Amino acid sequence: DNEVRMLVSSTESVLRGSDPVLSLLDKRVRDIFKSACTFVQPNIETLGKAVAPLSMRTGIQNTGAKASDPADFNSQKIQFVNALSQKSTKLGFNVAVNDLVETTYDAFKVIEHCMKVHEHDVLIPIANDADRSDASS
């Protein structure tokens, strides 16, 4: 009887969103997705030193490279996976780190694509309108 009451109480707190463990888990998952969606690939300015292209670092030439060089894509993904794996592990997601990083990388790519597609038609006009309204205030 006591176990049933505890189970009902725990279930009710989860459904109401007042369970502290679930709240902590939710906060940590949101934090990881926020980091994923705001990920900026390190470059010369952010690293403070020159970064050689992947082909120079590995000694492997990529013959027939296209405009969007796969070496750059892999390098970006590797950097993303490393950064988010560290953050996920630090937040206690050791068991599910691979699945979590893959999912956050998919979210990152979707947002990056939307930013590229809608930058000139949507985002820049919104930013310009915000600048004009701030200047008139």
Image: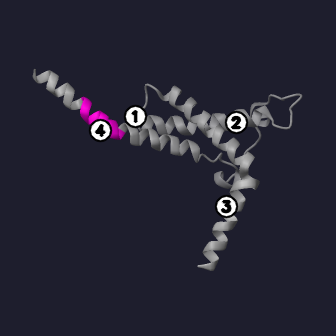
Label 3 residue SS: helix
> Which residue is rendered at x = 79% and y = 30% of the image?
59
Q: Quadrant of the N terminus?
A: top left
The amino acid type found where label 2 is placed reads: Ser
The amino acid type found where label 4 is placed reads: Arg
Q: Which residue is mark 2?
A: 75
Label 2 residue SS: helix
The amino acid type found where label 3 is placed reads: Ile
Query: Label 1 to label 4, Cα distance in Å?
Result: 24 Å
Going from N to C along the chain, the mark reached first, 3 or 1, is 1
Going from N to C along the chain, the mark reached first, 3 or 4, is 4
Query: Dot 1: within a 10 Å radius of its alpha carbon, few (fewer than 14), some, or many (20 or more) residues?
Result: few
The amino acid type found where label 1 is placed reads: Gly
Q: Residue furthest left?
A: 1
Going from N to C along the chain, the mark reached first, 4 or 2, is 4
Going from N to C along the chain, the mark reached first, 1 or 4, is 4
Going from N to C along the chain, the mark reached first, 2 or 3, is 2
Residue 78 picture location, percent across and down: 64, 34
Reply above or below: 85 against 121.
above
Counting every numbered tag in the picture gives: 4
Disc 2 to disc 1: CB gap under 8 Å: no
Q: Which residue is mark 4?
A: 16
Q: Which residue is mark 1?
A: 92
Question: Which span of residues is magenta-colored?
Answer: 11-24
